[in-house]
Amino acid sequence: MTAPRTDWSRQEVAAIYTLPVFELLHRAQSVHRKHFQPGEIQVSTLLSIKTGGCPEDCGYCAQSAHHHTDVKAEKLLPLATVVARARQAQAGGATRFCMGAAWRQARAGGEFEQVLAMVRAVSGLGLETCCTLGMLTEEQARRLKAAGLHAYNHNIDSAEEFYGHVVTTRTYAERLATIAAVRKAGITVCTGGILGMGESEAHRVGLLHRLATFDPQPESVTVNMLVPIKGTPMADQPPVSPIVVARVIATARVLMPRALVRLSAGRTQLSPEAHLLCFYAGANSIFAGERLLTAPNPERDADAKLFENLGLKAMPRDTRTADAGGLGGAAAEG
Ligand code: SF4
């Protein structure tokens, strides 16, 4: 199978994004069926292993020490707690377990060693392991890979020209450098953005263009909707329309045919009908569990009911590796 195109121009991306919606959905669904089993959804679980007190000033985030929110800074969770939560997630049907820490960059020394132990233990349970720990050096990425890490999440949030409205304590270039370190270490890349932060349609196109022109493309693409949180600069942003979310997902599906497209934060804002639209547009991964780091998420029962009503089933483990240009062994996903 030939590798997906990575030389998209911004105009080409805009032309896909602005197609009449039925045309766009039809294209996305056709592409989706070539690469995945329709109706199979990957179920991931995300655990906050170190909550709050983050020195970054991301305008959407409850965990930033710059904002006055209800989230209190906590210490890194003990290994036993993390393993117990991973077992629980596995029993609930999750195949991927993500661990998030509110750090500007992964810590050196003891705390990093503890995270490595968590990665080893969670991988040892047979779960795909993912981390999001902030910026990483190449050496840290190599050590995470050696510990068994399957994926690293590092979102680019939006188009580069809008990034200064989202965060001022780090640059887009720093974001890209961490993604490059992850790729170089042979860890699969999970990245994406957030909709509803006040960005324009052109910025959404810019985000999709940046994602689709990574070479190789990310194995997982997260599509988040802003969850407005009291005390953050983005608390009063109006909700983004599910039709916009579906457009972004469908465009991502056309541009990045082999990526898992993960409907992430903000699912509590989506009705069952809006979920259906997003899955039809090509989303094939969700986070399950009542909380997504510090934001609310649909309860497991609600998701189980949704899966049953829509005839969806959980996708088996992702067996791709990042070694063969990021897309080796995609067959497990149909
Ligand atoms: S999004 Fe991540 S880096 Fe930004 S403030 Fe929140 S925890 Fe820190």
Image (cartoon, rainbow, N blue to C red):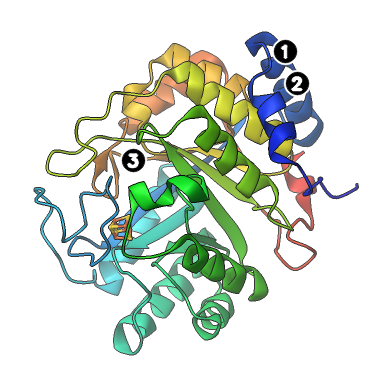
Label 1 secondary element: helix
**Whole-percent x, y for residue 27 in the image:** 75, 21
* Image quadrant containing the C terminus: top right
Q: Which of 197 and 278 is in front in this view?
A: 197
Ligand 1, what quadrant? bottom left
Label 2 secondary element: helix
Check disc 1 and give the amino acid type: Glu
Asked if the residue under mark 2 is in contact with the one under mark 1, i.e. CB atoms within 8 Å, the reply is yes
Quick check: 107 above or below 223? below
Check disc 3 and give the amino acid type: Gly
Check disc 2 and give the amino acid type: Arg
Work out whether residue 312 can be spotted: no
Q: How many numbered marks does the figure carry? A: 3
Q: Can you tell which quarter of the image residue 188 is in?
A: bottom right
Badge 1 density bin: few <14, some 14–19, many ≥20, Cα 10 Å: few
**Whole-percent x, y for residue 71 in the image:** 13, 52
Q: Name the residue under label 2.
A: 27
Q: Which of marks 3 and 2 is in front?
A: 2
Residue under the image location 33 percent in, 35 percent down: 226
Residue under the image location 37 percent in, 65 percent down: 170
Query: Which disc number belongs to residue 106?
Result: none
State whether label 3 is within 8 Å of ligand 1.
no
Residue under the image location 34 percent in, 48 percent down: 166
Quick check: 309 above or below 191? above
Q: Mark 3 points at which residue?
A: 289
Q: Which of 304 and 166 is in front in this view?
A: 166
Q: Name the residue under label 1.
A: 23
